[in-house]
Amino acid sequence: MTVAQLMELLEQVAPLRLAESWDNVGLILGDPAAPASKVMTCLTLSPDVADEAISEKTDVVISHHPILFRSAKTIRADQPGGDIVWKLARAGVAVISHHTAWDGASGGANDYIANKLGLIDLEPISPAPGRECVKFIVFVADDNLEAVRSAAFHAGAGQIGNYRECSFSTPGTGTFYGMKGTQPTVGQVGIRESASEHRLEIVAFKHLQNQVLSAIKQAHSYEEPAIDVYPLAAVATKSETGVGRVGKLPAALTTRELARLASVRLQSSATQFGLPMPPFSEKPILKVAIACGAGDDLLDLAIRSGSDAMVTGELRFHSLLKARDAGLATVMVGHYASERLSMDSMAELLNKKCPDLNVWASRKESAPAMNL
């Protein structure tokens, strides 16, 4: 397997379209054509983890947190941050990050927390928008309709949800006037002609636009086919992917019980919890919002979702006050605990999808903070 093929495999697991616009995801360091037989996952590429990757002769590190997250003007071995990139590059170790794409993916970081807590009826706090699509409108002679339609389908067009080969056509009459030098399929040059035609409509994912357009032109019988291509608005639909998660506990718990459960299941040694203001301080917790890592940006969505509690990695002081005043209980297991175990899960998932691939989670990575 090459790095490029590993990237294709990761795209199936955590599509990059799910990543936030501010994120730095994909192949950050390395050669797409290089081999990728030994792969290590980790939460953060700290110096000790980078040394581990090099000593294990790792081909690729999949780091949840991206390196070079902010633009860098220099990469120097004697400067923090640059030293890691320099060492990895010299050792030929590629680095990939899917970060917020993995957070929002089905089976990703947020789903991992929700499943560990036993939540049911899961859905994203904010569903991911549908994949960007285009619509082709093609005017085609009646006897050429099926050939053009089949060519478009073969090129990947016509998929809507779990249905494929979707299209719509309506009959009509087209006119054209072939000028000097043309070779019309029907009729004569220099005369306005009429022909019985169909208006064919087919959708396709935007990344397939060029190959679908090429297939339509090759199958079309006209010298100059009339083809319109329209962008389609990406709409939020019911989806398993997207930002955060909301689900229900099988049975109501107190905030303290939920905090203990999260601490044990996520192997957190630094779990904190916050109670709402009276009279909601001891209300039973049933509906739970999930936000791996730093949950501040999802707090308003968690409140609007009607959740009783939010389980996250960390929250800023003023976010805690806002949650308390809004009647939302909070459980914070620490940034590390909220995301690290999901990278073990990613390694297991990749090994399952490709048994020939040697994937393991970092054995040396550890939490940067501990309790007394």
Image (cartoon, rainbow, N blue to C red):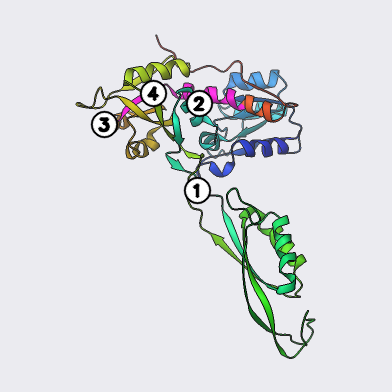
Instruction: State the residue in front, 302 or 47.
Output: 302
Which residue lies under the disc numbered 1? 129
The numbered mark, 4 or 2, whose residue comes first in the sequence reads: 4
Which residue lies under the disc numbered 2? 339
SS of the residue under disc 1: loop
Q: Is residue 337 magenta?
A: yes
Quick check: 48 above or below 129? above
Q: Which segment is the magenta one? A: 325-346
Quick check: 189 above or below 94? below
Q: Position of residue 153 (x, y in %)?
A: 70, 57
Disc 1/disc 2 C-alpha distance (Å): 24 Å
Marker count (numbered): 4
What's the residue type where badge 3 is placed?
Answer: Gly
Disc 3/disc 1 C-alpha distance (Å): 29 Å
What's the residue type where badge 4 is placed?
Answer: Met
Disc 4/disc 3 C-alpha distance (Å): 16 Å
Q: Position of residue 160 (x, y in %)?
A: 59, 53
The numbered mark, 2 or 3, whose residue comes first in the sequence reads: 3
